[in-house]
Amino acid sequence: MHAGVAPPIPVGKIKSFGPFGPKYEVGQVLRQLDDGDWMVEVTMVETGEKAEYRLTHLSDDPDAH
């Protein structure tokens, strides 16, 4: 699979891991994975910790309220 153009990323949006999980802020795209998915940097709202998260998982997570 060849490298593609990153899809639109909702940078700055606050989401949560599942309906009741911790909140995180969406950051920049980091890289494309071999399976075609993308790794995105996320920052935990409560701790400020940064992590990498798959775009397909991020897209399934609800917006935090």
Image (spheres, grey):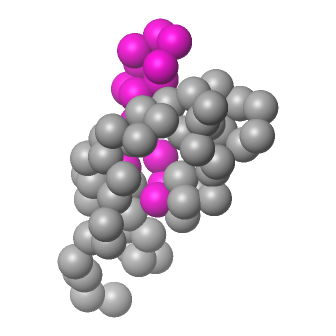
Locate residue 19 relative to residue 54 in the image: left or right: right
Question: Can residue 32 be seen in the rendering of this structure?
Answer: no
Q: Does the magenta stretch include residue 54?
A: yes
User: Residue 63 falls in which quadrant of the image?
Assistant: top right
Front-most of 2 and 25? Answer: 25
* Label total for image: 0
x, y percentage for residue 44? 47, 23
The answer to whether residue 48 is seen in the rendering is yes
Instruction: Report the span colored magenta.
Output: 40-55
Q: Hey, which quadrant is residue 16 in on the image?
A: top right
List x then y, in percent, for residue 30: 26, 51
7 in the magenta segment: no
Quadrant, the N terminus:
bottom left
- The residue depicted at 47 percent of the width and 46 percent of the height is 53
Closest to the observer, 24 or 32? 24
Q: In this view, does 34 lie to the left or right of 17?
A: left
34 horizontally vs 14: left or right = left
Looking at this view, is 4 or 15 the one in front? 15
Position of residue 30 relative to residue 8, above or below, is above
Q: Residue furthest bottom?
A: 1
Q: Quadrant of residue 27?
A: top left
At horizontal 41% and vertical 77% (from top left) the residue drawn is 36
Q: Residue 23, position in %: x, y?
A: 57, 28
Residue found 62% across the figure and 32% down from its top: 65
